[in-house]
Amino acid sequence: MSSKKPPKPKHHFVVDEDLGSSYWKILNQDDRFVTDRFETHWAPGTHDRLWIPQIAERGLIVITHDGKIRRQHRDVVVAYGARLIIVTGHSDFQGQARAFRDSWHKIDRFINKHSAPFIARFTKPSGKTLKKLKPVGNIVLSREFRT
């Protein structure tokens, strides 16, 4: 009897330092995700304009909670063809990480559908929306990238 191996992950993510190590740990426990911590590649506090070009060159996708990137550094994202997913909301990061992990199929489809550059927003459902989407969240293009 042969056991079927899980598919090899197609996407390589970097969890930004603003989400903390618990976010990375939750995603890293799931074989569908290849994840690195921001600190694996850059020193803490490295300016966005320095690391955004490097993530694009390496083909990495950043998961961040830093919403200012889409307003302040859109030009760098576009110029270098970067891919960023901004986790929105103020709930606990562990809950957001579990929602992100449980939304794998939506995230995978989104990344396959949208070529770089992009900035996307990932939202964890709450209240009435949680009952409709349970247990997964939602991912959409940031309005600056919609046509």
Image (tube, rainbow, N blue to C red):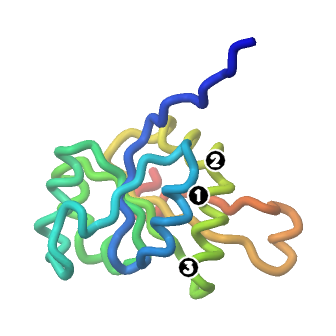
Q: Can residue 52 be seen from the camera position used here?
A: yes
Q: Which mark is residue 68?
A: none
* Residue occupying the point 15% across, 54% down: 54
* Residue occupying the point 73% across, 59% down: 136
Above or below: residue 39 compared with residue 108: below
69 displayed left or right of 99: left
Above or below: residue 127 compared with residue 70: below
- Amino acid at the residue labelled 3: Phe
Seen from the viewer's position, the closer of residues 11 and 2 is 2
- Amino acid at the residue labelled 2: Lys
Residue marked by disc 2: 106
For this orientation, the residue located farthest to the top is: 1
Residue 128 image position (x, y, % from top left): 87, 76
Q: Secondary structure at mark 2?
A: helix
Residue marked by disc 1: 139
Seen from the viewer's position, the closer of residues 74 and 131 is 131
Q: Can residue 67 be seen from the camera position used here?
A: no
Seen from the viewer's position, the closer of residues 12 and 117 is 12
Q: Secondary structure at mark 3?
A: helix
Residue 85 image position (x, y, % from top left): 44, 61
For this orientation, the residue located farthest to the left is: 50
- Marked residue nearer the N-terminal end (3 or 1): 3
Asked where in the image residue 89 lies, by quadrant, the reply is bottom right
Tell me if label 2 and label 1 are in contact, CB under 8 Å. Answer: yes
Cα–Cα span, label 3 and label 1:
16 Å
